[in-house]
Amino acid sequence: MQLFSGRRAASRCLRHGHAGPAVAPAPAACRTHRSNRHVVITAASVTVEPDIAPLVQRWLQWDRRGASREQITQLVENGRSAELRDLLGSRLEFGTAGLRGKMGPGTARMNAVVVQQTAQGLCVYLEDVAADQLASGGIVVGYDGRYGSKEYAALTAAVFASRGHRVALFRRVVPTPFVAAGVAELSAAAGVMVTASHNPKEYNGYKVYWGNGCQIIPPHDAGIAAAIEANLNLWNLEPLLIGAGPYEDGASTAGLLACPQLSDPWDHVSAAYYARLAALSFLPPAAAASPIGSTGGNGSGSVSRAAALGALGTPVYTPLHGVGAEPLLRAFQTFSLPEPYIVPSQRSPDPDFPTVVFPNPEEGAGTWAAAFAAAGERGARLVLANDPDADRLAVAECGPNGQFRPFTGNEIGALLAHWVWTNFRKRHPEVPPSRCVMLASAVSSKLLGAMAEKEGFKFVETLTGFKWLGNTAIKLEREQGMTVLFAFEEAIGFMLGGMYKDKDGISAAAVFAELTAHTYGSGRTLDELLRSLYDRYGFFDYRSGYFITDAAKSRAVFNDLRGGGGFEGRTALYAKEVAGVRVASVRDLGTGLDTSQPDGRAVLPWQSGDMMITYGLEGGATLTLRASGTEPKLKYYLEVKGSDAAAAAALADRLVGGLAEELVGLSRHGLKRPAPQH
């Protein structure tokens, strides 16, 4: 039988498609003419379900890669309709996080076709809504060391250059924060960072920054997504990119690299980045003693620089096979800190992440194993880790018993906030505390709020993610004239005032190392400093975790959490208790309800259908359930505040024990617990 047919009589090989895809011309300075090519594919005795056939036909019109075409056509020849539907039956969704997914052929995977279509949509959208800024500042593009990242960056650059736009393309792997910095320093219309951050090696992603240097928020995500759908036919990118790809070597990208619209922003952006970072160093010069208090912010005690750095010793650092090593070394040099020992087996970018199962320092001791071993051998007290794109920071300290204690994101955030606040007040006594602000996401610890209440600065809570933290920080600065000092989220993301409006693991590492040097020079450990903050601001017992799920199961869970009332909220009925603890208030950011507010409406931005519910419980407990937007996880965040650590821990234990089955319905909905961490 004939599965695919076309308007012309010619037919061609189903598997190889030598002549290439249908293309759409892109008017620009750096383009030459190429004749149209037509794809007509026939195959005999192929059995796939009828709705799959046009999806395959469309994909093979786009895809020029022999290897990926081979995967699709092999599935067709074997009648593997379910697998084809998985690859071709949906589109990798573009949202505020951009794109992130497994690599492979098809519209539901990360690949060169999907990336070019995404770049085309972004380009057209910017031409429509930010034409002046695009004309003057162009776009910034960076990439990490994952498979495909360099090529996806080249494709993005070629798309914009083909339309005559300026492109600042980093010619080396860079940390994600350098793209945010590039957008701000070059006044670009947007930035693209090709990375999947801390996801496993099978993944890649496409993160988009708006012209304010922050990750995109609505309505831009929907506008870009619509523009992608309207521009699926691939533009002709020759002579910028030659051949069918991959576009990773000098021969295939020679035209792009020679294009006058292209520049490398590394020198300009890195110089500006480290100049900003230098202003965040607070340790005194070698001849001076530190005026900063060695206790919980009361200003007593002092420590010399020599004593501080001597007590710090040589920290151990791992970039977890990512891009952080060289930028971090320069950050330490900027602060005149001792050069850290970098774990040799994890120093260089490696897309296979060979020494870890998950390149995520939050995933347990297994990810820390090589760094802890190196620190133990060298007698190091402080261990630092970045995730592979270096926008997050993890910290661990060697205790008196020789065991290493990783700090949570909330604990790191509390220590950094204390350090930044104490030093800022000493350096800028003329700025009233009421004009200063710190921010945290809604699922992060409320200790920062307690600190703000006692110290007199303003605390602002935002939705989850640095897209909200960064954009809110800009709004506070521009509209209210506030001084933004710090922002963080519990997922080890930190933003220091004076840097850029996104999380940054490089600047945070340098500042934290200096904080640690001062603490050790004062004769204390980080754990002791943290406990002094609890004494001053109250004790916060924080627990977080997740269940493995998928989008459909998550929606079923949240439908049940609303008592079957659906996502419009008109008939929602919420739990009255959790593990026998009374629910005092409910905030549902999928319906706009917040019973703690006088008018019953949420203050935080909400969107119908969003899967995030927060319960205020008796005893000072807060419990949030949220479906992850980038991973197949349903996450929970629990915090109990109290002056008695034991009582707070007991209540937290009780609630964690009851939430899985009683509230979430783990077994009923077919969710799974993650494997134990090792």
Image (spheres, grey):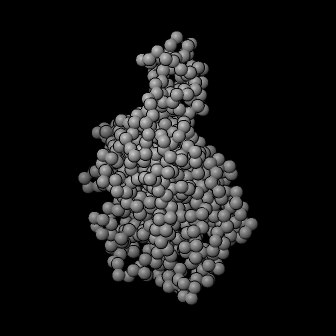
Q: Nearer the viewer, residue 635 or 174?
A: 174
> Where residue 80 appears, x then y in whole percent?
57, 22
Q: Quadrant of residue 502?
A: bottom left
- Position of 121 with respect to 356 (left or right) is left
Q: Residue at x 53, y 46 (%)?
A: 253
Q: Residue at x 49, y 58 (%)?
A: 264
Furthest-front residue in view?
Answer: 33
Q: Residue at x 55, y 75 (%)?
A: 335
Furthest-top residue in view?
Answer: 1
Q: Is residue 446 visible?
A: no
- Position of 570 with respect to 329 (left or right) is left
Furthest-right residue in view?
Answer: 377
Q: Is residue 533 visible?
A: yes
Furthest-left residue in view?
Answer: 599
> Where residue 8 appears, x then y in whole percent?
44, 17
Total residue callouts = 0
- Above or below: residue 336 compared with residue 190: below
- Above or below: residue 608 compared with residue 583: above
> Where residue 530 appears, x then y in whole percent?
54, 70
Q: Nearer the viewer, residue 448 or 658?
A: 448
- Above or below: residue 567 compared with residue 160: above
Q: Nearer the viewer, residue 594 or 605?
A: 605
Q: Residue at x 33, y 77 (%)?
A: 432
Q: Quadrant of residue 13?
A: top right
> Where residue 596 appears, x then y in whole percent?
32, 54
- Position of 20 with respect to 311 (left or right) is left
